Image (cartoon, coloured by chain):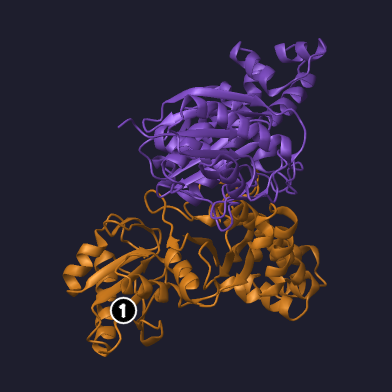
Chain colours: A purple, B orange
Amino acid sequence: MSPRRVIGMDSGGTKLLGGVIDETLSVRDRVHRLWRGGGRREVLDLMVDAVEEARAAAPDAAAVGFGIPGLVDSGSGAVGFSTHLPLEGLPFRDLMEERLGLSVFVDNDANLAALAEQRAGAARGASHVAMLTLGTGIGGGLVLGGRLYRGAHGGAAELGHVVVDVNGPPCQGNCPNRGCLEVMASGTAIGREGAAVAEREPESALGKELLAGREITGALVTDLAHDGDPAAVGVLALIGERLGVGIASIVNAFNPEVVVIGGGVVAAGELLLEPARRVVAERALPPNRDQVRIVPAHFSDEAGMVGAGILALADGDV
Amino acid sequence: MSPRRVIGMDSGGTKLLGGVIDETLSVRDRVHRLWRGGGRREVLDLMVDAVEEARAAAPDAAAVGFGIPGLVDSGSGAVGFSTHLPLEGLPFRDLMEERLGLSVFVDNDANLAALAEQRAGAARGASHVAMLTLGTGIGGGLVLGGRLYRGAHGGAAELGHVVVDVNGPPCQGNCPNRGCLEVMASGTAIGREGAAVAEREPESALGKELLAGREITGALVTDLAHDGDPAAVGVLALIGERLGVGIASIVNAFNPEVVVIGGGVVAAGELLLEPARRVVAERALPPNRDQVRIVPAHFSDEAGMVGAGILALADGDV
């Protein structure tokens, strides 16, 4: 008998990534789609089309796992809320099972990324894991006691919306709060602080880029920091320290064994993680602070897809 | 056959409260002891003495549950860390079983208070519950998915040490952090802010108490607020708003159905809870903020004892 295979699909805000995943969690027959605009019908058609492409390579796959950027009721498989895709209010699982003739499992994409890191990535072997995904915003996922933690209605693990500064700047997206970790330490925040430092220090490499008319983004600050620009290094240290304050709250609340940092911002590497670890060691409670490892993610942009595969392989019981 | 009975013991920082608890969770034959100083031996002797008194009233009780103000390894029943009692490093469960000849179960006191509220108190019927105990400091407890959540090593649910203000004042006790909920919104904080307002507003009732030489404590501020002093009402509103900021982080991270507020500070009632609810409604993420109830505790100072009884009745499996 050949090993069991499933299809994992991660629906991000801009694209769909999928693949065929077996019980060893190796990924083959990847499929990619870019959203081409349109409404709910176009999005669902593109998903079905991508699944069918993967299925052609693995006709034995009996189940599909989907990661969705939104609030998912894991009991019913319905999407309660989705900022990036027009899926709000959709009985997603039932509808996809009907269209595909396959078992379908669905969960929040950040939850599935955390699951992938806990089962097979940077937090393998740990039972209590928090994950932060640093990009334009900050997503979160929690595996507690070895199980995905979703809260009462699927809304848990919004760890980017733990407050760091009660009087901080207004948060991003649909968040009505101020001073959340997301607005203080995301890639967007790196760009914003980088622009401020560039103005103050026109002689720095960062300042020269601004004078040359370039937009100061998080990615540019990170590149300049890796090239050794002290101003850019200082920006990453500031953001890393704020990240550490948020992680300290998480460490005090959850007593995790591992905090995994993923997302594009992890390109900053130790320039970001070292200040974060230092602040956690200074500010979190003993003994929690001595028991936690803060590590970069193992999976890059495939974490959600692998997690979706794990979900499907376990018949949704994760 | 008569219903099963156990003994519940809550070891606070200043006293020991115990009682005989049956499966309906009614408490009888209460016992009280005040710590009389001394070291580990005196503390353990007093515990044994109190258990024996309860046992004389209920000779059929076959198990004892203990709540301890410290870090407890629920697997081994050892105390890892205790600020208020000299129990650090003690294999508490094994030692007590040896001395009492009874089954012994032990957990953190704030965890057990949360368990009591979730199983039989203000959060009865809910599966996802966070509890904050507001007194001199702020304790925390979590019941997630219907189970007590302890984290990797028993250190979870330190919800008083979620940061509210990155640049806030140094926190209390053994906490090395700044701007934690504990230092911003505990009974101690009410007294501190009350004293500041009393200085600024000497014509207020609060100001007159200061001029008369009284110490401005949280309890005094609460009394004056209940009597209608606008200055004191303002202090509780400020503290309630900060509490709301902390609860918003908790609501975003855990998506609980209920947040229970206990401890002596709850005497402030709606003067504290109404501003907290308003801030959560304004600042926490939808839909989490619409799904959570913020309610005062049902059990007052007996929550820990009842929780210890629940722990023993369930043979530690909570």
Q: Is residue B156 above or below residue B10?
A: above
Say left or right for B301 vs B57.
right
Image-based side of B209 in relation to A313, left or right:
right
The answer to which image quadrant residue A6 occupies is top left
Residue A9 x, y percent position in the rendering:
55, 33
Image height of A6 relative to A228, above or below: below
The part of the image, by quadrant, that contains residue B132 is bottom right
Residue that appears at 68% across and 58% down: B289
What residue do we see at 39% from left, 44% from top? A127
The kind of secondary structure element at disc 1 is strand
- Find residue A226 and report its image quarter: top right
Quadrant for the N terminus of chain A, please.
top left
- Local crowd at mark 1 within 10 Å, few (<14), some, or many (≥20)? many
Residue B266 drawn at (x, y percent) = 61, 73
- Between residue A140 and residue A289, name the one nearer to us: A140
Q: How many marks?
A: 1
Q: How far from the left and from the top, in percent, is residue A148? A: 47, 47
- Residue B79 in sight from this viewpoint: yes
Residue B2 versus residue A265 in the image, above or below: below
Residue at 48 percent across and 49 percent down: it is A254
User: In the rendered view, does A4 fall on the left or right side of B92?
Assistant: right
Amino acid at circle 1: Ile
Query: Where is residue A275 drawn, in percent x and y?
Result: 54, 29
Q: Nearer the viewer, residue A221 or B179?
A: A221
Task: Tell me the subunit letter for badge 1.
Answer: B
Identify residue for label 1: B7
Q: Identify which residue, A9 or A141, lies in the foreground.
A: A9
- Residue A50, compared with residue A232, is above or below; it is below
Which residue is rendered at x = 56% and y = 47% of the image?
A157
Compared across the picture, whether B317 is left or right of B169 comes to left
Residue B172 visible in the displayed image: no
